[in-house]
Amino acid sequence: MSSQNTTISGKVLGSVSGLPPEIWTMIGDEIQGVNNLRALVRVCCAFRDIFTPALYGRTVLKLSNYQPDKIHSEELKPQLVHTKHFEVRVEEFMSRERSYDVAMNDQYATFVARMLKAMPNLRSFSWYDSPHEDHIPSLMLRNKTLIDALKSRTLLSHLYVSFDYQWTDEEEQSLNCSIPLAGFRNLTSLELYNIGGKEVDEIQGITQALSSSPHLRKLGLGLGWRTDCEGIPEILLIRGEGDFLLDLCSRYHSLGMSPLKLETLRLGHGVFPCSDKPNTGNFLANLVDMSGLKTLHLFNGLVRGHDDEDTYLNVNWTLFDACICLRQLAVSRLGPALRLWLNLDNISQSVEELIVTDHYPFHSSELKEFDSLRLPKLSYVFTREVTVGSEPDEWSDTDSEFESEADSELSSDSEADSQDSNEDDPREESERMALAKHPLSGSKTITVLDRLYDGGVNLKRLGICLDLDTSWGRFKDHLRTLSQLTQLRLNSKSVRSGGYPSKQSSLWPDAKRPREIALEYAKLIKVECSSLQYLQIGQWVWRFTNSIGTHLHHPDQVELRKLEYDELMSIELFAMNTFASESGLPEPETEHEEISDEEEDRMERMLAEIGLAYREGRSVDPSRFEA
């Protein structure tokens, strides 16, 4: 769009609305959904010129869709001039007839460089890397032509790179999972996840980029360490001494740089806020000025060291005592030490949002930590919880018949570790006494709402795992008290479950498919919670279109609209992936494809066969669930 067209469009719109073109551009940036923008572009010439940049502001390139011998002649689209956000996805390339060769990297990298040079307005570059060719394609991110083209984008402020190394069996392949950072400058956001180069080289490159970006506001780091994925949650396999963060802070401080005034800090696998070395003090303060930090995401889940013992990462929470402005905290688990830290006066008065990402073991004793949590401003909770009994020996789970013995043993060990680590803490003892006076009662099926001391009455956003067939009555009672709730996400409480909501949860004879059942529940939920504006049940997300504040008395009065992919991705609660894939940190979904009726039927047959085979002590017969 030329500047002359912009001026003309601005005059036309200004004469109609009295608003300058800059305001219309801001409006375009806020509109979510490709279909909405396309409709606006078709309204008139002025709208076309104003909203076209927003329509084509995001470009996604899947390299596997292109053949290497033809990609050099691929014609670039003129709309690339509008691109502000460029995503490159490196996935599996070749079919069985042809294997991937390292020589193909140059062809693909040159094509990406061509596209970058056609994007003068580029602000954000994201690289999602998950190939299955021994990470040979990952090397193209070290291609000089590509990197030079990326560095030449003078408006670039956000750099995001995520590899998928943690699933590989060869640690040597991790050396391919890296990006040379020297020369990047003036970044406001830098995120590197599952990186696998030599740690000394990675630290040097990161510190160079940080020292050249004094106005950085977001930093996310995670190493590509392997995980044991057989159990739930996964167990991180520690490599080396685990002092990457300590060494990074020391290196940055040695350059004489002032601590970064970050607003968001994300520390994933291998970037641990703790150290076994003596006299390290608050080493993190050498890198980050904690006083302005608003968002903190940490991995603090299960780790396995050289002694083959599984323990929870022992985070040094005192490193974050100066976080007086902390608003959102995302962690793998809510353990005793973290809960005590959250209950400190200066922390409890600031934290408003709590995200807990671990799929807790079915007998985890740590769910009780929610009972004594005291966050008076808590307005957003996201958890992966399970169904439990009202007494310690009544833990149960309707989907847990395949639970491994290792899960049970791990839970027992975790409980013992928690007791040992806190038996001498007077604060812990006083809170245990308080819990004894406030036992859970009623239904055996509870949620985090039953555990929070105030029942979550001030929540505006809530994401939980819920069995609608066993928990609807109790959950409905909670909905009536959540007068401020505007966003709600409901998922299956078991990662082993099939279609959600299940057929057993249907209250309607004609609603048998998960999407039909979900829609009927959505209407019921809106009737019970009039403040609700957005709702996700399983894979479906809706916006209620009734006037805000209207009290509805019957489900037939509810009006709702299914959200487009771009719309739901703009809402943090709904965008969050089921698994924490960014080095153990919460990650947005990258794709959303609705499961077909046929696939739902197949999944149900598969689960039924697995359950039957387990009970009969035989091998699973795939022919019983294949169509």
Image (spheres, rainbow, N blue to C red):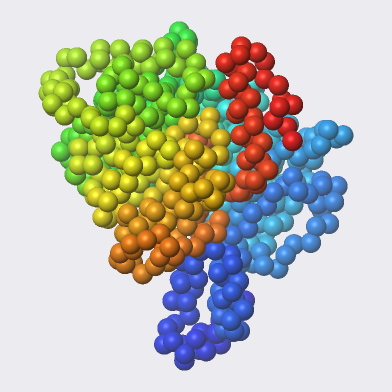
Most extreme residue toward the top is 307
Query: What residue is shown at x 31% (from left), y 40% (from top)?
Result: 474
Which of 292 and 43 lies nearest the eye of the viewer? Answer: 43
Q: Which percent across, then down, holds residue 245?
A: 41, 29
Question: The N terminus appears in which quarter of the rendering?
Answer: bottom right
Q: Quadrant of residue 614?
A: top right
Query: What residue is shown at x 27% (from left), y 51% (from top)?
Result: 480
Most extreme residue toward the front is 509
Q: Which percent across, then down, holds residue 286?
A: 32, 35
Residue 393 in the figure: left or right of residue 600: left
Q: Relative to residue 525, is residue 299 depicted above or below?
A: above
Q: Which percent across, then down, holds residue 101?
A: 80, 34
Q: How many marks?
A: 0
Residue 546 in the figure: left or right of residue 9: left
Query: What residue is shown at x 57% (from left), y 16% (from top)?
Result: 615
Q: Which percent across, then down, holds residue 566?
A: 54, 58
Q: Relative to residue 451, is residue 303 depicted above or below?
A: above
Query: What residue is shown at x 59% (from left), y 67% (from top)?
Result: 35
Most extreme residue toward the bottom is 15
Question: The C terminus appears in which quarter of the rendering?
Answer: top right
Q: Relative to residue 461, is residue 1 depicted above or below?
A: below
- State whether residue 58 appears in this view: yes
Which of 182 and 173 lies nearest the eye of the viewer? Answer: 173
Residue 535 in the figure: left or right of residue 440: right
Q: Relative to residue 396, is residue 189 depicted above or below?
A: below
- State whether residue 177 appears in this view: no
